[in-house]
Amino acid sequence: EDDEEEDGDEGQEGGQASGGEFESSASREEQAARMKAILDRLTPEQMDRYECYRRSVLQKPIVKKLMGSIMGGVQPSKEMVIIMGGITKLFVGDLVEQGKLIMIEWEDTGPLRPQHIREAFRRLAEQGKVPVSRQPSIFKPL
């Protein structure tokens, strides 16, 4: 009897999962339609930047090594490295986009230069979009 009840429960869960799969499939289609609408509005220059962003990847061994050095020698898990790589990629994308806006504001042309990136970082920090170190500074004010 216990086996039959378990089978009955599994059937119910399967039905719920099927409904969930249908809903997630519909939401994926909606997201794809929204993404297509957004991409259709991009200028050719924006589309080139977006394509470069999509193709770019941070090398996992480098991210892992950097994280290990920050974490005091503790090796991060594979999942942590993937998450940190994704977060870093988003941050760099924000930094580049802000830098491009600064170039337009300053009426500069050509590639991004260090001063654009520095100003973009300063503005993102001002907006609270840059993580703050919780470690005390080794330099104390006089």
Image (cartoon, grey):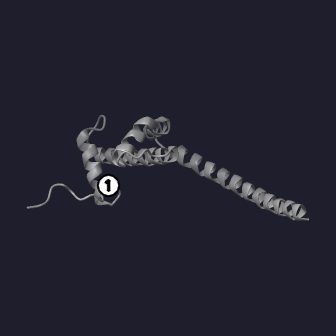
Dot 1 corresponds to which residue?
Answer: 124
Q: Which part of the image, by quadrant, shows the C terminus?
A: bottom left
Pointer 1 local density, CA inside 10 Å: few below 14, some 14–19, many at least 20: some
Viewer-side residue, 18 vs 121: 18
Residue 126, above or below 101: below
Which amino acid type corresponds to the residue marked 1 in the rendered image?
A: Leu
Q: Residue at x 32, y 60 (%)?
A: 127
Q: Residue at x 77, y 59 (%)?
A: 19
The image shows a total of numbered marks equal to: 1
- Decide if residue 49 is in sight here: yes
- Decide if residue 59 is in sight here: no
Viewer-side residue, 130 vs 126: 130
Viewer-side residue, 45 vs 91: 91
Q: Quadrant of residue 65?
A: top left
Q: Quadrant of residue 112?
A: top left
Q: Which part of the image, by quadrant, shows the N terminus?
A: bottom right
Residue 116, above or below 130: above
- Return the residue found at the far left: 142
Q: Residue at x 69, y 55 (%)?
A: 24
- Taking the image as shown, residue 61 lies to the left or right of residue 104, namely right
Counting from the top left corner in percent of width and height, residue 100 is at: 33, 44
Counting from the top left corner in percent of width and height, residue 38 is at: 53, 48
Counting from the top left corner in percent of width and height, residue 135 is at: 27, 57
- Taking the image as shown, residue 14 lies to the left or right of residue 112, namely right
Q: Secondary structure at mark 1?
A: helix
Counting from the top left corner in percent of width and height, residue 67 is at: 39, 45
- Taking the image as shown, residue 1 lies to the left or right of residue 86, namely right
